[in-house]
Amino acid sequence: MSARPQKLAKSGDVSSVMQRYYTAYEEVNVLLNAYAQQAKDEKIQMSIDGGGFRENVLNERFCDILRCAITQAFVNCRKMNPPQKRYIKITSMDGQHKVFVKISYPCEEEECEDTDCLSPSISSVLKRAEGYFKIQNIEMEQVIMIAVPYET
């Protein structure tokens, strides 16, 4: 995994902040903890429900997909005025031999972007494995939905 999550933490050392354990996979925990610290620093309310994360799908590609989605949420969330309306909610579930992740955050209708930040190689892996990465606008909220099949 790249060193990107460590760069997100203000001190550069995620262990210097309160470490939370969302999964049994250290790299995903580092990633989520770094973003939780970034949200705290930027006064963005963040909630993370990691109950659906399964260790057998949590690999480097999964981290890349998750990083892309959370970064997208931060970019759009920062545009919200007033700042008190800024939040990011991350929930995970598992079923149908897949891990589902839903990331929701507020956005002004004219500010919502439907950019697909995934690299072509990750997109093709998801398509071959019958997974997906979708962005939907629902009223004043944007929702990113990710499905990643379990590794066999």
Image (cartoon, rainbow, N blue to C red):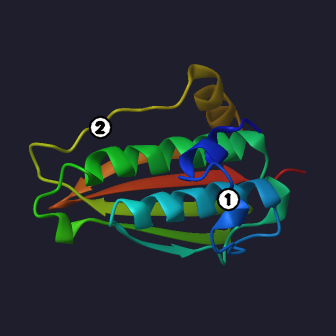
Mark 2 sits on what residue? 114
In the image, residue 110 above or below residue 54: above
**Residue at screen point 81% across, 60% down:** 26
Where residue 80 appears, x then y in whole percent? 17, 56
Compared to residue 146, the image places residue 54 above or below, namely below
Circle 1: residue type: Val
> In the rendered image, which quarter is residue 19 located in?
bottom right
- Residue occupied by mark 1: 14
Q: Quadrant of the N terminus?
A: top right
Q: Specify few, some or many for label 1: CA neighbours under 10 Å numbering under 14, 14-19, or 20 or more.
A: many
User: Which label lies toward us, 2 or 1?
Assistant: 1
Q: Secondary structure at mark 1?
A: helix
Left or right? Give the position of 148 relative to 80. right
**Left of 34 or right of it: where is 16?**
right
Q: Residue at (37%, 50%) from the top-left corner? A: 74
- The three-letter amino acid code for the residue at tag 2 is Asp
Q: Residue at x 82, y 63 (%)?
A: 55
The Cα atoms of the two marked residues, 2 and 1, are separated by: 31 Å
User: Is residue 98 in view?
Assistant: no
> How far from the left and from the top, in percent, is residue 13?
68, 54
